[in-house]
Image (spheres, rainbow, N blue to C red):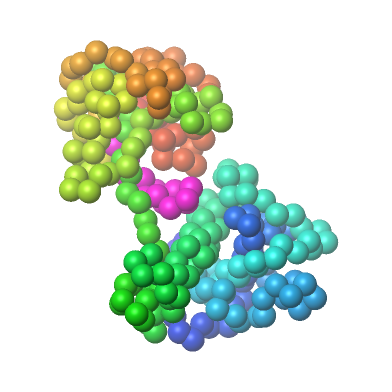
């Protein structure tokens, strides 16, 4: 049994026994972490932020059998003994189920904030009576929380794997290649295209390893090991600053942590030797 059991939109919400507070894209954390057993009442009343039970509160599911909800505060309030932290700072510092629960909370809040007005006609939207969706009463557009599917692949060549450094990453980690699935593609087609575009290689046999929710801001990562079959290693300098082959016994220390799917792909390849 896992700590968290997700749920869709339940109306009316059950009474929350666990709480996550979000403001400005960050999460309120105490010394016990980002999940609170009670809410500091003054954050709702003294600062004019929101009222308890307002529409900016959402049911997420059950944590250890108790209903859990997220509350969005449009006005950030300082709470003694707590600090506001970004989601990335929680990666590896809280248990994995809790990290992904907080990621779910942020994605639900972002969906709510981003679709208060219809993207088709500009009118204000309302909550769907049953689903977690926002609906435009004027043109009938329905918007659910959006998930962007991505492929992430470790390209291999015998006892070697290809690791790359990405130009957009602040941390100079050696990691696997990745990219978004385009309309009309399946995951394997996206994998072959992304490898070709990013490093100039052709791929053959692929092995599915696993998937991972990646809330930065809302991806579903689909992970593969992919065998290189040809081409010349020519990194795309716009996205890839460096790409090198490494023997499984000489993997650099600067790789993603095991909590990430990229880190798991690399360690799966190492352990296979």
Vertical comparison of 86 with 205: above or below: below
Residue 164 placement: quadrant: top left
Q: State whether the magenta stretch is mostly helix, strand or loop.
A: strand
The residue under the point 16% across, 27% down is 204
Vertical comparison of 168 with 122: above or below: above
Q: Which residues are magenta?
A: 211-225
Residue 250 placement: quadrant: top left
User: Magenta stretch containing residue 215, yes or no?
Assistant: yes
Residue 235 placement: quadrant: top left
**Residue 69: x percent and y percent?**
56, 72
Residue sitting farthest toward the bottom: 12
Vertical comparison of 47 with 201: above or below: below
The residue under the point 83% across, 61% down is 80
Q: Is residue 30 found left or right of 260 in the rendered image?
A: right
**Residue 172: x percent and y percent?**
53, 24
Q: Is residue 215 found left or right of 170 in the rendered image?
A: left
Q: Quadrant location of the C terminus?
A: top left
**Residue 201: x percent and y percent?**
24, 21
User: Magenta stretch containing residue 259, yes or no?
Assistant: no
The residue under the point 44% across, 48% down is 214
The residue under the point 61% across, 68% down is 72
């Amino acid at each position: 049994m896992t700590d968290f059991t997700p749920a869709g939109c339940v109306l009316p919400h059950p009474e929350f026994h666990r709480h996550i507070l979000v403001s400005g894209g960050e999460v309120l954390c105490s010394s016990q972490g980002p999940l609170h057993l009670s809410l500091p009442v003054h954050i709702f009343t003294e600062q004019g932020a929101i009222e308890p039970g307002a529409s900016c509160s959402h049911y997420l599911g059950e944590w250890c059998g108790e209903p859990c909800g997220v509350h969005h505060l449009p006005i950030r309030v300082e709470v003694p003994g707590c600090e506001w932290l970004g989601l990335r700072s929680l990666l590896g510092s809280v248990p994995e189920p809790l990290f992904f629960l907080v990621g779910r909370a942020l994605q639900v809040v972002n969906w709510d904030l981003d679709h208060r007005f219809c993207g088709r006609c500009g009118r204000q939207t309302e909550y769907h009576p049953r689903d977690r969706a926002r609906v435009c009463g004027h043109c009938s557009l329905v918007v659910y929380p959006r998930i962007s599917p991505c492929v992430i692949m470790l390209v291999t060549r015998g006892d070697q794997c290809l690791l790359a450094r990405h130009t957009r990453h602040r941390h100079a980690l050696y990691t696997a290649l990745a990219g978004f699935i385009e309309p009309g593609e399946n995951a394997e087609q996206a994998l072959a295209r992304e490898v070709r575009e990013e490093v100039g290689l052709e791929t053959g046999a692929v092995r599915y390893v696993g998937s991972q929710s990646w809330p930065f801001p809302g991806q579903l990562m689909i992970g593969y090991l992919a065998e290189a079959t040809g081409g010349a290693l020519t990194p795309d300098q716009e996205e890839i600053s460096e790409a090198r082959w490494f023997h499984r016994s000489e993997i650099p220390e600067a790789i993603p942590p095991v909590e990430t799917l990229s880190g798991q792909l690399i360690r799966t390849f190492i352990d296979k030797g």
